[in-house]
């Protein structure tokens, strides 16, 4: 077994027992990146020197007998929309190709305080807009399991890096499924925390009321350990919730007896591919055999989630992305006649097609005369979707369904038709609209050998139950984690 | 035809908080460009705002002082537009749910009292500053002012003359000063006004088309802009022209307004609720706490000054119009037996000095105790009124105590009758013509002789003694 | 509802984007498809009695105390600026 095959918890254990050193583990990952990144394209920036320096200092701490934190010395990657002081943070956009943040995101700070080794910055769809990672200005990311296929998006680099063992774990961001869908496509574990559980300070905003940072990991144990580092109240984020956050590892129990699992009938309708449906229903049966109680629930407003999502997220994005104007940072057009020309040329040359499309859509939704019919209407539907879940949670503890209607598709397959691409987010966007938490984990493979992701959706701030349910499944089937993927 | 002018104001006041509205940078005026900045107020990617609690409290204080209803629930919204002084390309402001609404202030013009309605008061952030290069090719952007908290006060179109506008503006300014909500330093841009103005034939119900004159930052400019714009609109109508609804800028030097090229042609600000900030809920307990922090307001203080210090109503109104002046008066009058003299000094020499130097009352270089000692020196006949003016000048320039100045400069009244008498005799013998005039009944001549004596004594001779001794000596002749 | 080329041009201007004729063509079609799909869908619902949901979190009054913190070094604020001079960001002359 290679060092890079180890999960974070396993590697941490070996580090603590002095079976491996932080330096050799970090080097192993850097070598793996050297070997694979050219093909997969998971990293935009690799911080080899910084990572090795950090590894040495953590190893020194360890050698001096200091108590070390649970994930000390574990190498990880960050999605390139999470600010890292003096390390290029690009959002995979030409617009921010040369941007050096003068500050660290709160999660970046937390990782470094936990002595996690930052290997580099991970590829993504430009400004997190996309479901295939084909919208990166740098290069599309390839699915490590099939290089002709997409890894999903927008945290495609993060999922591919973890799946191909180029990082032990990664942090992604999820606005409408951007952690869960790529996790599902690449066969790894991805958690989208409850809105307000993880600080957004330093996460370059796409849609402020939906964005949330979360872990992408090799297994559920790692997911709980990373959550222990990143969850918590941050006074720098007004939407960060000030409550007591649990030790998520205490939920790593192989026990779902009496857990009420809801199956929303709307999640098993016509759009769902047969093979995916089959494997999800197998997982349901497995849960039943572990002692869970399965109930059908209804989320009647599911079909309205996609239009509501695209209106709300694009509206917020049109405002959030207005600051990229060529004055303070980032790209600036070379020639211009006046300030307005500077704005227009800079933004037209600096943004890619999908970003421009969303800015246009959002501008439309907020513009005078359309606000009530589009934006306000979408906010009303948001409440209906929110209440849908509230009602369901009176009956059940978690909701189970597919993460995505199908497995990874081929590069270029959906780029011509944006609406078709958007419709693939049907099972994930509702979670962001309602501010809930959800985890995606692998529950088998289709006939092409592509991983299928199942999604467990939890009540607000009930990540613990998700971790317990996911851990139970993983413990009994051993199916999750790419250690089985044979890469 | 007779016309009626209809005026409403939008006033921006910078709040006197220590830190900015959404970050911990200082609000201090000045400083090298871009040194009062951080990633938050310069709109770097990834940053988030957190609302300064004092901003809410100050805005509510202003609202209560202006008789507004305070919203128990309000929210902040984004106003989207591109401009280089606005780093996020949106201004965080309040749109449909402002913190305060439906207030009024009473003003008094030509003896009659009038209520001016206040539509709303909301919180928002200030923008940065553009410095234009002389070459005319580039502008420099300084974000120090970016994120300084503001309140915007919007009035009803209730004013009908520049006198009413002046009275309202000064009333509002004094209230903001009294409540310590803003330092109201107009030359630093802490307080500025936009004027909305239309005219209509007298008796007509409907409003005429209005224009907006932006960014006026002195009372004089506001008054002149109102009068100038009213004249312009009337003359357009008189020539059967049409008023265009537009934004204009007032050139105070030329005394005329000109049309601004629209910077945001479509003016579609695409307001929407700020997702990065939570709603503001002001409950009764918090409201009571803020209410109890409001000090005595100008109207109450005016009445108290009349009763307590026995100064005339006019003086009291003038002095309480400015909180720093009123504070200065009160501190000086408390130490003095002659409050009226203090108020005379303030309305006279002090105001003249402030006007000449362009200083704000808050930055006055003399202490109230010094003024009250100066008044005592006059009342106790240690110096003459004329000498006192000289002492005041020195006090203003050096900040020294008046008694010390009098001592150092030897300005005490000469009361030694023998010394005065010898000068009287000297002046009489040097001016035989005037003496002759006096003897022949031209009593005016005595004034000339007194003047000569005062000149000889450099104004220090006790005038009563001079008069008495001069008469005695003349009668001897 | 039909989205016209003029609508797209007006929006592009508001969003400060220059679009090529091809982009306008493509966007007009894409936007019409997306907007019509969204609106037709959402309009199936009567939401007259539903309050818009601005925040999913039931929290309010998140404040910071009025305390000054050290500002950043100017070099840090300006280091990413495409053009700067004399401690300022530089832009082409802005006419007022």
Image (tube, rainbow, N blue to C red):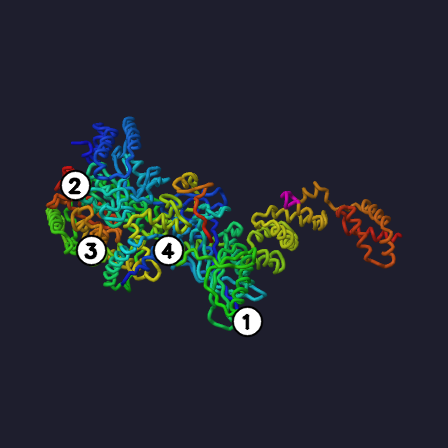
- Crowd class of label 4 (few under 14; some 14 to 19; many from 20; radius 10 Å): many
Counting from the top left corner in percent of width and height, residue A38 is at 23, 37
In the picture of the structure, the residue carrying the numbered disc 1 is: B2
Give the CA separation, mark 1 to mark 2. 85 Å
- Of badges 1 and 3, nearer the viewer stands 1
Counting from the top left corner in percent of width and height, residue B145 is at 46, 47
- Crowd class of label 2 (few under 14; some 14 to 19; many from 20; radius 10 Å): many
Of A15 and A381, which appears nearest the observer?
A381
Q: Is residue B40 visible?
A: yes
What secondary structure is marked by label 4? loop
The answer to whether A108 is drawn above or below residue B91 in the figure is above
Dominant secondary structure (helix, strand or loop) of the stretch shown in magenta: helix
> Given contact means CB atoms under 8 Å apart, are the residues at marks 1 and 3 in contact?
no
Q: Are marks 4 and 1 on the same chain?
A: yes
- Of badges 4 and 3, nearer the viewer stands 4
Query: Of the numbered discs in the image, which one, if any, rests on residue A145?
Result: 2
Magenta segment range?
Answer: B394-401
**Left or right, residue B355 beside residue A117:** right
- Residue for point 29% across, 36% down: A114
Tell me, yes or no, whether the highlighted magenta stretch contains residue A39: no
Q: How many numbered marks appear?
A: 4
**Left or right, residue A100 beside residue B114:** left
Counting from the top left corner in percent of width and height, residue A196 is at 30, 48
Give the CA separation, mark 4 to mark 1. 44 Å
Identify the mark nearer the N-term, 3 or 2.
2
What secondary structure is marked by label 1? loop
Identify the mark nearer the N-term, 4 or 1.
1
What secondary structure is marked by label 2? loop
- Crowd class of label 3 (few under 14; some 14 to 19; many from 20; radius 10 Å): many
């Amino acid at each position: 077994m290679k060092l890079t095959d180890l999960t974070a918890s396993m590697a941490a254990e070996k580090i603590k027992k002095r079976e491996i050193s932080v330096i050799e583990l970090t080097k192993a990952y850097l070598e793996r990146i050297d070997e694979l990144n050219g093909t997969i394209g998971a990293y935009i920036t690799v911080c080899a020197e910084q990572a090795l320096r950090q590894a040495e200092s953590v190893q020194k701490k360890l050698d001096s007998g200091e108590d070390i934190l649970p994930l000390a010395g574990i190498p990880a990657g960050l999605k390139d929309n999470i600010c890292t002081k003096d390390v290029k943070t690009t959002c995979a956009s030409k617009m921010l190709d040369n941007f050096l943040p003068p500050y660290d995101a709160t999660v970046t700070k937390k990782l470094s305080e936990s002595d996690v080794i930052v290997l580099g910055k991970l590829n993504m769809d430009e400004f997190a807009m996309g479901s295939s990672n084909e919208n990166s200005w740098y290069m599309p990311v390839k699915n490590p399991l099939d290089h002709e296929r997409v890894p999903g998006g927008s945290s495609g680099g993060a999922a591919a890096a973890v799946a191909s063992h180029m990082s032990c774990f990664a942090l992604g961001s999820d606005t409408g499924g951007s952690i869960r869908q790529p996790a599902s496509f690449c066969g790894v574990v991805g958690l989208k925390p409850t809105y307000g559980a993880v600080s957004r300070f330093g996460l370059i905003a796409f849609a402020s009321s939906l964005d949330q940072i979360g872990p992408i990991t090799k297994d559920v144990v790692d997911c709980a350990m990373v959550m222990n580092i990143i969850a918590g109240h941050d006074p720098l984020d007004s939407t960060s919730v000030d409550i007591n956050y649990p030790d998520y590892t205490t939920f790593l129990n192989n026990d779902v007896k009496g857990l009420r699992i809801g199956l929303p009938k709307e999640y098993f309708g016509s759009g769902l591919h047969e093979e995916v449906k089959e494997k999800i229903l197998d997982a349901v049966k497995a849960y039943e055999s572990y002692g869970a109680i399965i109930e059908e629930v209804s989320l009647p407003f599911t079909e309205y989630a996609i239009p509501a999502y695209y209106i709300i997220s694009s509206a917020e994005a049109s405002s959030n992305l207005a600051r990229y104007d060529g004055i303070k940072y980032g790209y600036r057009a070379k020639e211009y006649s006046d300030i307005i020309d500077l704005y227009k040329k800079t933004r037209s040359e600096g943004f890619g097609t999908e970003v421009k499309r969303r800015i246009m859509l959002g501008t439309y939704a907020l513009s005078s005369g359309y606000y009530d019919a589009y934006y306000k209407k979408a906010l009303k539907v948001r409440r209906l979707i929110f209440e849908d879940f509230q009602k369901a949670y009176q009956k059940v503890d978690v909701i189970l369904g597919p993460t995505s209607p199908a497995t990874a598709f081929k590069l270029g397959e959906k780029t011509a038709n944006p609406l078709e691409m958007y419709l693939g987010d049907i099972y994930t966007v509702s979670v962001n609209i309602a501010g809930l938490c959800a985890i995606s984990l692998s529950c088998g493979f289709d006939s092409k050998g592509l991983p299928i992701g199942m999604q467990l959706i939890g009540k607000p701030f009930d990540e613990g139950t998700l971790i317990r349910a996911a851990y139970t499944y993983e413990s009994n089937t051993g199916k999750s984690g790419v250690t089985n993927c044979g890469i | 035809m007779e016309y009626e002018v209809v005026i409403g104001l939008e006033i921006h006041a910078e709040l006197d908080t220590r830190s900015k509205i959404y970050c911990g940078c200082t609000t201090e005026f000045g400083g090298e460009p871009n040194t009062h900045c951080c990633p938050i107020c310069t709109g770097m990617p990834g940053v988030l705002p957190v609302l300064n609690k004092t901003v809410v409290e100050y805005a509510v204080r202003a609202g209560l002082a202006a008789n507004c209803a305070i919203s128990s629930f309000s929210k902040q919204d984004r106003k989207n537009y591109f401009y280089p002084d606005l780093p996020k390309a949106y201004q965080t402001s309040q749109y449909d749910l402002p913190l305060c609404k439906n207030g009024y202030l009473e003003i008094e013009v030509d003896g009659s009292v009038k209520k001016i309605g206040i539509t709303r008061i909301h919180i928002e952030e200030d923008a940065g500053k553009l410095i234009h290069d002389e070459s005319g090719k580039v502008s420099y952007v300084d974000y120090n002012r970016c994120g300084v908290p503001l309140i915007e006060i919007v009035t009803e179109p209730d004013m009908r003359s520049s006198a009413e506008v002046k009275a309202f503006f000064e009333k509002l300014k004094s209230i903001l000063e009294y409540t310590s909500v803003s330092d109201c330093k107009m030359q630093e841009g802490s307080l500025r006004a936009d004027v909305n103005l239309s005219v209509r034939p007298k008796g007509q119900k409907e409003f005429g088309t209005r224009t907006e004159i932006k960014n006026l930052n002195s009372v004089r400019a506001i008054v002149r802009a109102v009068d100038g714009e009213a004249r312009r609109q009337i003359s357009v109508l008189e020539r059967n022209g049409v008023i265009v609804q537009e934004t204009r800028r007032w050139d105070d030097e030329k005394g005329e307004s000109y049309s601004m090229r629209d910077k945001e042609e479509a003016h579609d600000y695409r307001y929407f609720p700020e997702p990065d900030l939570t709603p503001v809920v002001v409950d009764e307990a918090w409201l009571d706490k803020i209410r109890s922090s409001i000090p005595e307001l100008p109207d109450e203080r005016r009445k108290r000054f009349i009763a307590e210090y026995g100064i005339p109503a006019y003086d009291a109104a003038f002095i309480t119009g400015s909180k720093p002046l009123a504070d200065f008066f009160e501190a000086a009058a408390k130490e003095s037996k002659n409050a009226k003299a203090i108020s005379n000094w303030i309305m006279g020499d002090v105001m003249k000095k402030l006007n000449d130097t362009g200083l704000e009352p808050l930055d006055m270089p003399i202490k109230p105790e010094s003024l009250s000692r100066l008044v005592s020196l006059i009342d106790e006949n240690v110096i003459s009124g004329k000498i006192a003016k000289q002492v005041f000048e020195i006090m203003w320039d050096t900040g020294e105590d008046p008694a010390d100045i009098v001592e150092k400069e030897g300005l005490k009244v000469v009361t030694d009758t023998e010394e005065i008498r010898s000068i009287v005799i000297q002046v009489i013998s040097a001016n035989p013509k005037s003496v002759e005039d006096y003897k022949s009944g031209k009593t005016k001549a005595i004034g000339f002789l007194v003047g000569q004596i005062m000149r000889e004594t450099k104004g220090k001779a006790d005038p009563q003694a001079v008069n008495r001794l001069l008469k005695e000596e003349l009668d001897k002749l | 509802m039909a989205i016209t080329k003029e609508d797209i041009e007006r929006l592009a201007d508001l969003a400060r984007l220059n679009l090529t004729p091809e982009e306008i063509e493509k966007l007009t079609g894409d936007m019409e498809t997306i907007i019509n799909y969204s609106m037709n869908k959402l309009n199936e619902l009567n939401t007259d009695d539903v309050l818009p949901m601005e925040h999913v979190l039931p929290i309010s009054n998140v404040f910071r105390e009025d305390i000054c913190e050290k500002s950043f070094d100017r070099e840090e604020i300006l280091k990413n600026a495409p053009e700067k001079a004399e401690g300022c960001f530089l832009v082409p002359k802005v006419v007022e």
